[in-house]
Image: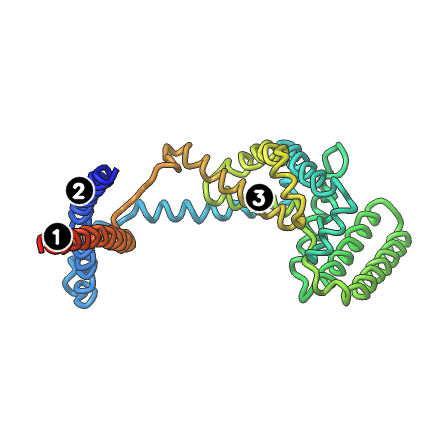
């Protein structure tokens, strides 16, 4: 048994020697490339210090880069399409409805438990479904424009949510009065305007009265806005067509996660904002991976370059192996010295 252990020890030492030799060669090559790249990067500084040395007569202007950046900027402006028009688009509205219904139905599956979870997490759950997503029929153009003006009033208002709601209510009152003016007498229009203004003031007063108790609460999640913002970011990143593609894949992705009992049970313990953020973030990452595959890239391929951190890691690994080998060698030396001392004593 003892001889078998010694043979295993000899084999381990030989393997460690080979591994150390391979890693040492690898480390030398890495350090050489690291030093080479380090001093290569210093060369442009000389050119910057002496700008007169540049030969601009034969300068290779990078015009393609200008075109690409201009195209990227124009793609970034594609998000100017208002969210309300996206919600009213016949091609996109069904996907909005599916995604909203899946998330809303899952989050409020148990209303009592949801209230308790939101209270524990200082949350307010989800905002009511967007008015443009209510009903089976497509909203009218007038209703879409009204919702756009109300949202813009909220975004342009100052300070807090109560002021934003009051501004939106005022816009709603003015829009209602304008609509009535086109179909009724001026007297009816003035009465409607006054009534709407009174309702707006009352709503603002109620919101202000509740503000003291809701100051520490996080805002309720607007699902339509959350989905729209993520889809817009995908379109800015991946170009035209990404918005519709993002919405098309979202319901299936939500069904896959929410249909997993193990994941769904754990998600149910989170607040509504945490659930929406987690699912939408992970779906966005999944969408980006899909875009990479369409371009021909492999997101799972390991793209590794020998950088400074890699050299440091290799150095620590070799140091660890050297310490292990030194420990084994010290054990053998100690055993050899003991056997030598025991042999000398036996001869005496």
The numbered mark, 2 or 3, whose residue comes first in the sequence reads 2
- CA gap, disc 1 and disc 3: 79 Å
Q: Looking at the image, is mark 2 or mark 3 nearer the viewer?
A: 2
Q: Identify the residue under disc 3.
A: 280
Labelled disc at residue 317: none
- Between 133 and 249, the residue placed more toward the observer is 249
Residue 58 visible (yes or no): no
- Between 326 and 300, the residue placed more toward the observer is 326
Query: Please, what secondary structure does the residue beneath circle 3 have?
Result: helix
The numbered mark, 1 or 2, whose residue comes first in the sequence reads 2
Decide if residue 128 is on the left or right side of residue 198: left
Residue 145 visible (yes or no): yes
- Between 319 and 92, the residue placed more toward the observer is 319
Q: Looking at the image, is mark 1 or mark 2 nearer the viewer?
A: 1
> Residue at point 54% right, 40% down?
283
Residue contact at pointers 2 and 3, CB within 8 angstroms: no
* Extreme-left residue of the structure: 347
In which quarter of the view is residue 36 placed? bottom left
- CA gap, disc 2 and disc 3: 53 Å
Q: Identify the residue under disc 1.
A: 346
In the image, is residue 305 above or below residue 316? above
Residue contact at pointers 1 and 3, CB within 8 angstroms: no
Q: x, y (%) of residue 58?
A: 16, 52
Q: How is the image coloured?
A: rainbow
Q: Quadrant of the N terminus?
A: top left
Q: Identify the residue under disc 2.
A: 14
């Amino acid at each position: 048994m003892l001889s078998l252990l010694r043979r295993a020890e000899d084999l381990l030492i030989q393997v460690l020697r080979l591994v150390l030799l391979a890693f040492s060669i690898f480390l030398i090559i890495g350090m050489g490339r690291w030093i080479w790249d380090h001093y290569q990067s210093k060369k442009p500084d000389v050119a910057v210090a002496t700008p007169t040395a540049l030969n601009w007569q034969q300068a290779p202007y990078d015009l393609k880069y200008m075109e690409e950046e201009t195209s990227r900027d124009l793609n970034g402006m594609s998000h100017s399409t208002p969210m309300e028009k996206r919600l009213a688009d016949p091609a996109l509205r069904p996907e909005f409805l599916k995604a909203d219904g899946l998330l809303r139905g899952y989050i409020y599956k148990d209303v009592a438990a949801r209230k308790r979870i939101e209270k524990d997490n200082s949350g307010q759950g989800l905002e009511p479904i967007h008015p443009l997503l209510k009903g089976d029929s497509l909203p009218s153009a007038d209703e879409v424009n009204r919702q756009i003006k109300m949202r813009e009033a909220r975004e342009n208002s100052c300070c807090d949510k109560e002021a934003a709601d009051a501004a939106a209510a005022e816009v709603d009152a003015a829009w209602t009065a304008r609509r009535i003016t086109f179909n009724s007498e001026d007297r009816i229009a003035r009465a409607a305007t006054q009534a709407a203004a009174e309702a707006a003031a009352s709503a603002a007063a109620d919101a202000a009265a509740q503000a003291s108790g809701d100051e520490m609460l996080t805002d309720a999640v607007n699902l339509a806005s959350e989905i729209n913002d993520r889809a817009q970011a995908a379109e800015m990143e991946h170009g035209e067509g990404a918005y519709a593609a993002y919405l098309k894949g979202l319901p299936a992705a939500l069904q896959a996660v929410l249909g997993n009992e193990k994941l769904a049970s754990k998600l149910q313990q989170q607040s509504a904002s945490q659930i929406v953020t987690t699912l939408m973030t992970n779906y966005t990452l999944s969408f980006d991976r899909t875009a990479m595959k369409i371009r021909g890239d492999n997101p799972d391929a390991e793209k590794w370059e020998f950088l400074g951190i890699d050299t440091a890691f290799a150095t620590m690994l070799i140091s660890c192996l050297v310490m292990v080998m030194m420990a084994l060698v010290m054990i053998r030396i100690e055993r050899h010295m003991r056997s030598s001392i025991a042999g000398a004593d036996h001869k005496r």
